[in-house]
Image (cartoon, helix red, strand yellow):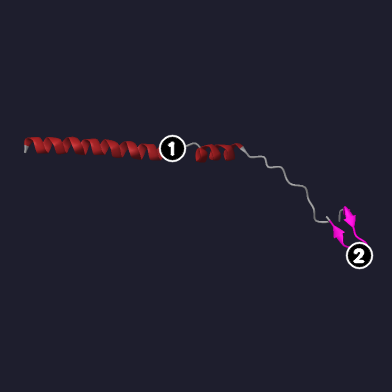
Amino acid sequence: MKATPYTTKTGIQIGCRYEPRQKYEPGGDMELLQVALIDPGYRPLATVLVDAFLWSLSAVVLVLLIVVVHYA
């Protein structure tokens, strides 16, 4: 047991369980995660690909609809 900083006259030990704060050192993965969560411009590649596919599909459907209505 480590020496306590202070013991009262009645035998109460003050500070016997005190431990200094541990220093927090974030790793590289944590910093990348924080950038991804904080940066509003960050989007995962899967989301970008799904959005591009849906926009392309919408454009094709719109063109086909216009062609069908025009030649009907």
First reached walking from the N terminus: tag 2 or tag 1: 2
Mark 1: amino acid: Arg
Q: Which residue is mark 1?
A: 43
Q: As drawn, which residue projects farthest toward the left?
A: 72
Q: Is residue 40 above or below residue 10?
A: above
| The label number, if any, that marks residue 24 in the structure image | none
SS at mark 1 in the image: loop
Which quarter of the picture shows residue 16? bottom right
Q: Is residue 63 left or right of residue 27?
A: left
Residue drawn 74% across the image and 47% down it: 21
Q: Residue furthest front?
A: 9
Residue 8 image position (x, y, % from top left): 90, 60
The location of residue 7, given as percent across then percent down, is 90, 58
Q: Which residue is painted at 27% across and 35% down in the image?
A: 56
How many other residues sit within 10 Å of disc 2, few (<14), some (14-19) or many (≥20)? few
The image quadrant of residue 17 is bottom right
